[in-house]
Image (cartoon, rainbow, N blue to C red):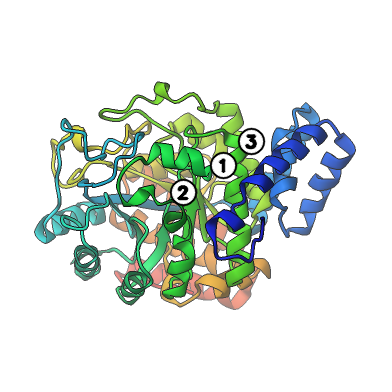
Amino acid sequence: MYDKYSMKAEEFIDDGEIRASIAWAEENKTNLELVNQLIDKTDELKGLSHREALLLLLCEDKDAIQRIFKQAEKIKQAFYGNRIVIFAPLYLSNYCVNGCLYCPYHYKNKTIARRKLTQEEIKQEVIALQDMGHKRLALETGEDPVNCPIDYVLESMKTIYSIKHKNGAIRRVNVNIAATTVENYRKLKEAGIGTYVLFQETYNKEQYEYLHPTGPKHNYAYHTEAMDRAMEGGIDDVGCGVLFGLNLYKYDFTGLLMHAEHLEAVHGVGPHTISVPRLRNADDVNADDFKDGISDELFQRIVAVLRIAVPYTGIIISTRESQHTREMVLRYGVSQISGGSRTTVGGYAEEHQDENSAQFEISDHRSLDEVVHWLLENGHIPSFCTACYREGRTGDRFMSLVKAGQIRNCCLPNALMTLKEYADDYASEDTRRLALEIIDKEAATIPNEKVREKVYEHLNDIDGGMRDFRF
């Protein structure tokens, strides 16, 4: 029985409720009066229920779809402006004891090159990332209690935060590791985790268990309830996501929003981020073997409806997607992207990394500087900001500022100052020129006169060699 306040996975992600929602949305998707009422409702900036959002997603009326896109763009501007936060994944290990059918890390795969980074190798990876200009990382590992225990992850985080190379520093470490215990989440919190990220892959319990036939990840309830344990352990920024292509998109889209509603109901704050990866080819995995892939056009609509359904939540898109696809969805909802990414273990420091250790094929192979240049050319503000995390503005404290419309008073100044750091320390000449132009243009738009004056002061200080200013 559906109950968003329940702590049991099969009650807050109720199969009957999802199927009833799909049936209701299919029945009403041509009811344009209701569709337009729901689009109008999003002007309140309070989001939509899972049923309401699914109805908008399934509506095929061209005029309504264009209204959804316009509304998504307006809402994104209201909360995030033109800012796009940049990060990079760092793969520590690809040892894994699970049997996931869609992932090349599965334990039966004998062709993938297995590897686990030493702390010295992690240092070299971090220095290489710092030399690109990165300030925010997402740690990635397979699930293996022997080769990759929690103590290894904690030690790796300590190593990463300790490295200061030239003007480089990693200021926020997000962690994407397997579902674990409340005690281990407390340890991650004490170690300075940014966001805890865990993809559900699919919310369909039957399909989930089929796709995860062996290993700890087979336990649907333990995996689905991980965010609750993370929040109990003190981690108030969590990131959700599904892997589109593993199951019927209608089902997983609905389940994803139900999960967000559950976290909001129980903990007072929904997910900090939602990721929207699509299944890709990898060693021992052929995406064509899965029948539920989604088109670029549908993917674009999913991002747009997510933006208006959960207006306060960051939406992440990775280098799984091509430059064209990423450009297509940036304006409609995406607020974070990866740049210059490697999905191989040891892929940043080594000139000839072993692609056979990659988790998936990358579609966007551009360098970080090329990504920054592209964002600037398209009118976006690349942001390397980590200020909210470091100032304690996380969880409900962050969301309260977002919902009140006050977060922009922090975000734009911080974005501009971190972009100035990048421009001075790492950018190519052409990228630096574009960055300085947009900094001059946007700094003048800061509404608070005192904040604006302080930003100009700090920009001059950065010219003088000082770093790491934040509001």
**Residue hosting label 2:** 200
What amino acid is labelled 3 in the image?
Arg
Q: Residues within 10 Å of mark 2 (few under 14, many from 20)?
A: many
Q: Residue at x 63, y 51 (%)?
A: 76
* CA distance for labels 1 and 2: 9 Å
Which callout, 1 or 2, points at the residue further toward the start of the chain?
Answer: 2
Q: Mark 2 or mark 3: which is in front?
A: 2
Looking at the picture, how far across and down is residue 250, in whole percent?
A: 62, 37
Give me the C-alpha separation between circle 2 and circle 3: 21 Å
State whether residue 73 appears in this view: no
Residue at horizontal 81 percent and vertical 47 percent from the top: 38
Indicate the position of residue 242 as horizontal and vertical percent values: 49, 44
Please name whichever residue, 342 or 131, is drawn nearer the observer in this view of the structure: 342
Amino acid bearing label 1: Asp
Q: Residue at x 89, y 39 (%)?
A: 33
Kind of residue indicated by mark 2: Gln
Measure how far apart labels 3 and 1 are at the Cα level. 14 Å
Residue tagged 1: 252
Q: Left of 242 or right of it: where is 219? A: left
Image: 396 above or below 349: below
| Left or right: residue 18 compared with residue 148 | right
Judge left or right: residue 255 versus residue 169: right
- Work out whether residue 63 or residue 265 is closer to the camera in this orientation and state it: 265
The label number, if any, that marks residue 15 in the structure image:
none
Q: What is the x, y in percent for residue 413?
A: 51, 66
**Would residue 220 be found to the left or right of residue 295 on screen?**
left
Circle 2 — which element?
loop
| Quarter of the image with the N terminus in it | bottom right
- Residue 301 shows which numbered tag? 3
Can you give x and y, in whole percent of width and height, for residue 339 in the image? 36, 44
Observer-nearest of 456 and 369: 369
